[in-house]
Image (tube, rainbow, N blue to C red):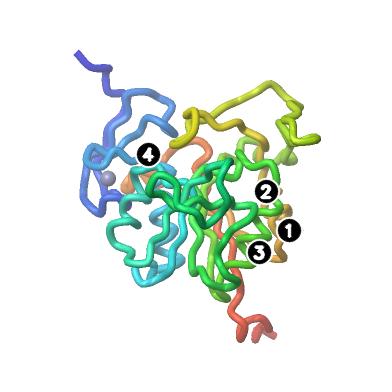
Amino acid sequence: MGDPIVFKCSGYCYTCDQNVDFIAYNDWFRDHFVCSNCGSIPRERALMQVIDTYFPNWRQAIVHESSPCGRGASNRLAKECSNYIPSQFFPEHISGTIVEGMRCENLEELSFADESIDLHITQDVLEHLFYPSKAFSEINRTLKPGGMHIFTVPIVNKNRESNLRACMKNCEIEYIMPQVYHGNPVGDGRALVTVDWGFDICWHIFNASGLFTQIIYIDDLSKGIRAEYIEVLVTFKPNKERQKSIIP
Ligand SMILES: [Zn+2]
């Protein structure tokens, strides 16, 4: 006998591009409201919907995804985008090298050339970096004009200011708050949370890169998108010809 179903509905799943049932066996929908066909969770479906809406020609674009999870939007991008570049971060290797068949990229020090990427994707990665400002700056450097960084990150602080949980001091981790870990597809399987982000993440991104960011909140059961911390963020690098507004 399995766990009782807490909630069930039908709809269109963005990550497997099918009409499916969405089923929750636990009332923490963020991790447990899954697609019966592809196993995706709500934030992955929300991310794919935002990619499709804001960057509809993603199939032809040069797309870099840092730390794909082997599920959901990562799988759809890998399947349908011909220039999809997945990477993982291996701390003991430099960016651009191949480790166990996977490209290593450190978001804080990318090996990509300036203005070479159309779309950077990260899913729940930016709460684990020690120097997120470096990552925002590197994403800006490597994006083509007109490119975007589309990502999820748990905005657990909401309207409160972002705060550090841990930082690097003299090459050692200094814990400012009790240690919290999330799952990690590589290494020892866990990733330390370094920042509790608030909505002011947009200000931090602007400060580091000069780029504007939108926070998109979707609550749509017909797409299986409902959960806590479901925001998708889009950082835009303007087109060169669009840098002056025509709006009077
Ligand atoms: Zn699905």
C-beta proximity under 8 Å, tags 1 and 4: no
Q: Amino acid at mark 2?
A: Pro
Q: Residue at x 27, y 23 (%)?
A: 5
Q: Kindly identify which residue carries mark 2.
A: 132
Say which mark, if any, is on residue 212: 3
SS at mark 3 in the image: strand
Amino acid beneath label 4 = Ile
Residue 168, x across and y down, in percent: 75, 36
Give the residue type that dot 3 points to: Phe
Mark 1 C-beta closer than 8 Å to ligand 1: no
Q: Secondary structure at mark 2?
A: helix
- Distance, label 1 to label 2, CA atoms, is 9 Å
Labels 1 & 2 near each other (Cβ < 8 A): yes
Distance Cα–Cα, label 3 vs label 1: 11 Å
In x, y percent, where is residue 149?
54, 60
The secondary structure type at the circle numbered 4 is loop
The crowding category of the residue bearing disc 3, from other C-alpha atoms within 10 Å (few below 14, some 14 to 19, many at least 20), is some
Image coordinates of residue 237 in percent, x first then y, are 60, 70
Tell me which image quadrant ligand 1 sits in.
top left
* Residue 140 image-quadrant placement: bottom right
188 to the left or right of 101: right
For badge 1, the amino acid type reads Ala
Residue pointed to by mark 1:
208
Furthest residue in direction top, as rendered:
1
How far, Cα to Cα, is label 3 from label 4?
27 Å
Disc 4 crowd, CA 10 A, few/some/many (<14, 14-19, 20+): many
Q: Which mark is residue 41?
A: 4
Lower position in the chain sequence, tag 3 or tag 4? 4
